[in-house]
Amino acid sequence: MTSVVYCTDPKVIKSLCLKYDTSGRGVFGVSDLKKIMDDLGFNFCKEEIQALEMYLDKNSDGHVSFEEFEQYWIKIASTSELSILEKRIELLTQAADIFRKYDVDSNRVISLSEFEKFYRELYEQNKNASMKEVEEAMKSLDTNSDSVISFQEFIIWLNWLNLN
């Protein structure tokens, strides 16, 4: 019998998600994601699960939908991604720590004022950057032009991993 770890059947993945959907809304949070990953054989710590949740939560609503999880799991289970999942989670955790440092109001996006602090601290030469330079730099990260930087936009910019 094939392990669920390598399963890409949406029905099997959905049944796993339903097992932990205590709200009945088709979404789950950090604690349920931890249980799912434990069931799949990955014993990630709280910080790692929080980083994974931030990555999977594409719309930054604070929850992972079945669809968000399914898309991710099918991608990694159908390739050699599982063998490097733990390293990717470690890097996501580091990225999430940096992101949260500058997401001062904890609304899961970085605003212009939060980005300004990040930008000025990033490189020595940015300390005296004009506001126009800060705004231009932010625009280069804000790929969907919604005037904030999501965690997904942030990790794409970091370019530590080929996550997308």
Image (spheres, rainbow, N blue to C red):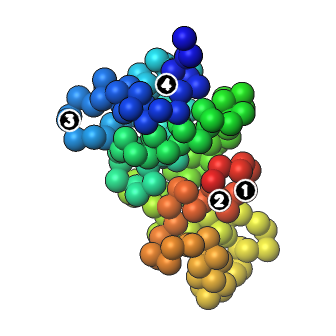
Quarter of the image for the C terminus: give it.
bottom right
Disc nearer the start of the sequence (2/3): 3
Q: To which residue does mark 4 refer?
A: 37
Measure how far apart labels 1 and 4 are at the Cα level.
Answer: 25 Å
User: Mark 1 Cα within 10 Å, few/some/many (few <14, many 20+)?
Assistant: few
Q: Secondary structure at mark 4?
A: helix
Measure how far apart labels 2 and 3 are at the Cα level.
Answer: 32 Å
Q: Residue at x 72, y 33 (%)?
A: 80
Which amino acid does the dot numbered 4 rest on? Met
Marks 1,2: beta carbons within 8 A: yes
Measure how far apart labels 1 and 3 are at the Cα level.
Answer: 36 Å
Q: To which residue does mark 2 refer?
A: 156
Q: Is residue 105 above or below residue 163?
A: below
Measure how far apart labels 1 and 2 are at the Cα level.
Answer: 5 Å
Disc nearer the start of the sequence (1/3): 3
On residue 159, the disc is 1
On residue 24, the disc is 3
User: Mark 4 Cα within 10 Å, few/some/many (few <14, many 20+)?
Assistant: some
Residue lying farthest to the left in this orientation: 24
Left or right of residue 14, residue 159 in this image? right
Residue lying farthest to the top in this orientation: 1
Disc nearer the start of the sequence (1/4): 4
Measure how far apart labels 3 and 4 are at the Cα level.
Answer: 19 Å
Q: Nearer the viewer, mark 1 or mark 4?
A: 4
User: Mark 3 Cα within 10 Å, few/some/many (few <14, many 20+)?
Assistant: few
Q: Tally the marks.
A: 4
Marks 1,4: beta carbons within 8 A: no
Residue 52 locus on image (x, y percent): 52, 39
Q: Secondary structure at mark 2?
A: helix
Residue 155 locus on image (x, y percent): 63, 55
Q: Secondary structure at mark 1?
A: loop
Which amino acid does the dot numbered 3 rest on? Gly
